[in-house]
Image (cartoon, rainbow, N blue to C red):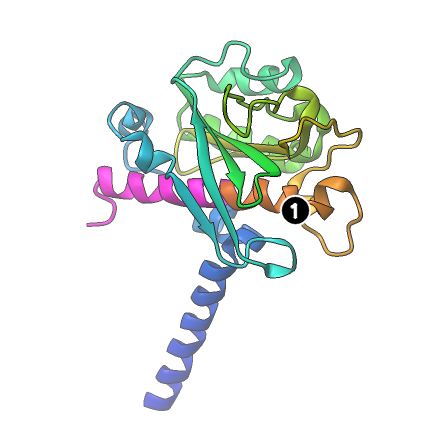
Amino acid sequence: MRGSARTAAAAVCLVLGFGLLGGAAAGVWLAGDSGERPAADYAETRSLWREIPVDTLFPRTLRGRGAGPGRADRRWTRVAVAPDADCRDAFDPPLAGILAPAGCERLLRATYTDETGSGVTTVGLLFTESGEKDMRALRERFDEENLELRADLMPRPYAARGTAAARFGDAQRASWTVRPLIDAPVVVYTVSGFADGRTVGDPQPAPEAVLEDQTTAPAQAGLGHDARGIADRIERGLRRIVAQETGQDR
């Protein structure tokens, strides 16, 4: 019995270890329903943005162990933080229309650059006005209709003068991800592109750009990995904040 217990425990630790190390590469435990437990109080979670320091929501530095192409390590540095705002003009009309039923309590955004300064990524936290039922419906729609893969549903970037993201406009968007959460009234999204202002004729969603043997510009530059890796880490941090602030970790 002791041997069996030790074997089972080792297996669990192995699985958890791969989940933590490979979360950015696979995004399974971060985005999968099995890892999502609705917040005890959606209303309390919805208002957290008012009290949490920006450096907690959007750390100055993010580290991605094994999060790059070929499981290379990545490191991203925050270069800009947008003032908290409503969602007016924050999304292209098709995406705005899909997100509209969820409502917009507040939108928080930050932009990061990779270590080379050649890639930039905007990450957003859309705090919605919806309850668990509506957030689950939104998530199910994204899953069932593969909305995350539609290029007309790319989020817009946040550029800031005097930073590596100064030339990061709509035409520079290369890869992206959009994730409605179920365990919190939040939509997490990222969009990445080139910092030098080059346009991308064929943007590719992050779930495709991170696959092996991809030859597209976003894939070759690791922009899909950046979009997914940063989304993973910001989402993970948000869950930790929610657990602490709502007492779920007690």
Span of residues in magenta: 231-250
Decide if residue 36 is in sight here. Answer: no
The residue at the far front in this view is 162
User: Along the line of sight, which residue is nearer the eye, 57 or 14?
Assistant: 57
Residue lying at 58% horizontally and 40% vertically, measured from the top left: 227
Q: Going by the image, does 249 lie left or right of 150?
A: left
Q: Say if the magenta span includes residue 80.
A: no
The residue where tag 1 is placed is 222
User: Along the line of sight, which residue is nearer the eye, 86 or 73?
Assistant: 73
The residue at the far top in this view is 88
Image quadrant of residue 118?
top right
Q: Give the number of marks.
A: 1
Badge 1 density bin: few <14, some 14–19, many ≥20, Cα 10 Å = many
Q: Going by the image, does 4 lie left or right of 212?
A: left
Image quadrant of residue 36?
top left
- Is the magenta region chiefly helix, strand or loop? helix
- Amino acid type of the residue that numbered disc 1 sits on in the rendered structure: Gly
The image position of residue 190, as x and y in percent, is 55, 33
User: Along the line of sight, which residue is nearer the eye, 124 or 127?
Assistant: 124
The image position of residue 152, as x and y in percent, is 71, 23
Q: In the rendered image of this protein, does residue 46 appear above or below residue 38?
A: above
User: Along the line of sight, which residue is nearer the eye, 230 or 115?
Assistant: 115
- Quadrant the N terminus occupies: bottom left
Residue lying at 49% horizontally and 65% vertically, measured from the top left: 18
Q: Going by the image, does 123 lie left or right of 105?
A: right
Q: In the structure shown, which secondary structural element does the residue marked by tag 1 occupy?
A: loop
Residue lying at 41% horizontally and 14% vertically, measured from the top left: 85
The image position of residue 8, as x and y in percent, is 41, 78
Decide if residue 63 is in sight here. Answer: yes
Q: In the rendered image of this protein, does residue 108 appear above or below residue 181?
A: above
